[in-house]
Amino acid sequence: MPIMPTFKDGPFSARNWRRAINILKRRRHIRGGPKIAVTQGPSGALISHAKDCFYADIQALGPDSEADYADERYWIKEQYVSNTSTDTTEAVTLGDKTSALHVTATNLAEITGGTHSVSAGEFIKAYIVRDAGSPKATRYIFNRLV
């Protein structure tokens, strides 16, 4: 049941927020959409913007031991914040996800020169984009100045 189209007096009024909360409280199974992620947690559903970026590290090889690229393309592997302490002042550590994305990503900062200067093991923030093809393909980009 779409929530937003049923609102007649604008999407951000207090009345509409109350209506949305009441709808969410009554529904046990909520589905997301192209830009909406719904995850179930111990205190209920969390509704957020769908993931369009993730932390990754530069890899020397592809997922099936493919050779590294020589241009602005890199093999990257998705990471997660692996801290388990409740001390939020400690340094963030990143770890490999079990079922991580291991994909080709393009460094926007190196497109013009076609260089390949980012070292394996460096961490980046990668973005998920859709190209202009038909059908559209998912691509991965990052911007690391070298």
Image: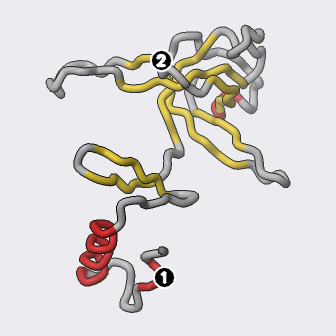
Above or below, 11 against 43 in this view is below
Percent x, y for residue 16? 31, 81
Percent x, y for residue 2? 48, 75
- The residue shown at (19%, 21%) is 85
The residue that mark 1 highlights is 5
Query: Quarter-wise, where is residue 17 in the image?
Result: bottom left
Number of marks in picture? 2
Mark 1: which secondary structure? helix
| Label 2: how many Cα within 10 Å (few below 14, some 14–19, many 20+) | some
The residue that mark 2 highlights is 96
Percent x, y for residue 137? 76, 45
- The residue shown at (48%, 59%) is 31
Percent x, y for residue 132? 78, 53
- At label 1, the amino acid type is Pro
Mark 2: which secondary structure? strand
Give 81 or 74, whichever is nearer the viewer.
81
Query: Quarter-wise, where is residue 12 in the image?
Result: bottom left
47 to the left or right of 72: left
- Quarter of the image for the C terminus: give it: top right
Query: Quarter-wise, where is residue 142 in the image?
Result: top right
Above or below, 63 against 78 in this view is above
17 to the left or right of 77: left
